[in-house]
Amino acid sequence: MYIEDAIVSENKAIAEGIYRLDLSAPRIAATAQPGQFVNILVHDDLIPLLRRPMSVAGVNGDNLALIYKIFGAGTTIMESWASGQRVNLLGPLGHGWEYDSERLPILVGGGVGLAPINFLHEYLLGISKEHWLVIGARSKKEHFLAHDPANGILLTTDDGSAGFHGTALDGLQSVLRENKNAPHQIFACGPPAMLEAIGTYTVKAALPCQLAVEEMMGCGFGICQGCSIEAKVDADNDQPSYGKRFKLVCMDGPVFHADQLVLNHD
Ligand SMILES: Cc1cc2nc3c(=O)[nH]c(=O)nc-3n(C[C@H](O)[C@H](O)[C@H](O)COP(=O)(O)OP(=O)(O)OC[C@H]3O[C@@H](n4cnc5c(N)ncnc54)[C@H](O)[C@@H]3O)c2cc1C
Ligand code: FES
């Protein structure tokens, strides 16, 4: 983990409310793995106090790419950054995707959940590993990739305005039907409802699946305990400690095996 002053090289809108930020950060770029994240100090003043966590969306030489959606104060400040802006980063943080070279990777992203999925996609392209990329959005204007099923890229839209008409889970199920004989491995990141749907489906169907989850964070490296998430406990452990019942998203994740997590809180 490094603290590094990165320099913005480009910051541009790529879809409605979604930006791609490229920064030169040689030390973090040299060690970042798909699924890891950086914690960004968006302002030198006290407010906003907490750093903002963002997944690494790609690495190119000394450069890191981030993909972010405008939510509130922090991401609004990020939107104003021009090339040459100095930005303090902490990273790389967390542990990333566990990739099994014997299986067909099926990557599923929704919304800005595309960032850690994109990094894995670029990694797999770099080692010429055949894989599928399923990207879900509500409508066409939220997509910034081209629908290209012949080359393993399936875009889905809830309203049918582009690509496959349906949710990201519908898209995943369609890819699974087409590749039913290949042992596969699913990687997903996106909004909580999407992760819950994909996690519940894959656990029920006993399909190997990893989910990259998000939680409010303070430190990003295991000190504040602010990012705990409920995890499954062994049935024979009737008095689980805090450490057995909860995991820290920043240290134990952000990538978890779907069957490790309590996905449905109803
Ligand atoms: C491991 C991880 C990776 C992430 N990767 C990305 C990414 O690649 N792209 C992206 O757009 N977003 C990502 N996020 C979410 C991102 O951190 C929040 O959207 C961002 O912090 C919002 O800041 P804000 O000041 O603009 O919004 P605020 O006004 O502060 O908050 C708006 C909403 O953002 C969420 N949020 C705020 N602060 C945090 C925080 N410290 N940690 C987590 N969530 C927060 C809350 O749900 C809040 O309701 C990631 C979060 C985590 C934990
Ligand atoms: S963010 Fe502080 S412990 Fe995870």
Image: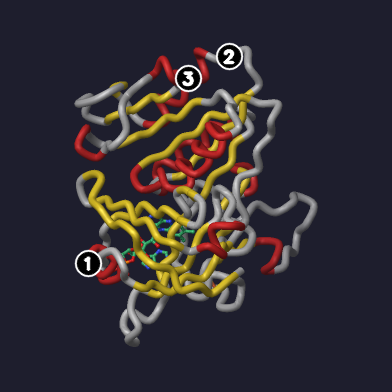
Label 3 and label 1: CA atoms lie apart by 39 Å
Precedes in sequence: disc 3 or disc 1:
1
Report whether 192 appears left or right of 256: left
Q: Position of residue 232 (x, y in %)?
A: 65, 52
Front one among 208 and 109: 109
Precedes in sequence: disc 3 or disc 2:
3
Front one among 76 and 266: 76
* Position above or below: 126 against 243: above
Label 1 and label 2: CA atoms lie apart by 46 Å
Q: Position of residue 222 (x, y in %)?
A: 61, 72
- SS for tag 1? loop
Q: Residue at x 34, y 44 (%)?
A: 111
> Where on the picture, by quarter, is residue 259?
top right
* Position above or below: 130 against 218: above
The residue tagged 3 is 175
- SS for tag 2? loop
Amino acid on which the number 3 mark rests in the picture: Val
For the residues carrying marks 3 and 1, which lies nearer the camera in this image?
1
Q: Residue at x 71, y 26 (%)?
A: 102
The residue tagged 2 is 180
Q: Disc 3, disc 2: CB below 8 Å?
A: no
Label 2 packing within 10 angstroms: few (<14), some (14-19), many (20+) = few
The residue tagged 1 is 80
Q: Position of residue 214 (x, y in %)?
A: 46, 57
**Residue 199 appearing in the image:** no
Q: Residue at x 64, y 59 (%)?
A: 252
Asked if disc 1 is less than 8 Å from ligand 1, the answer is no
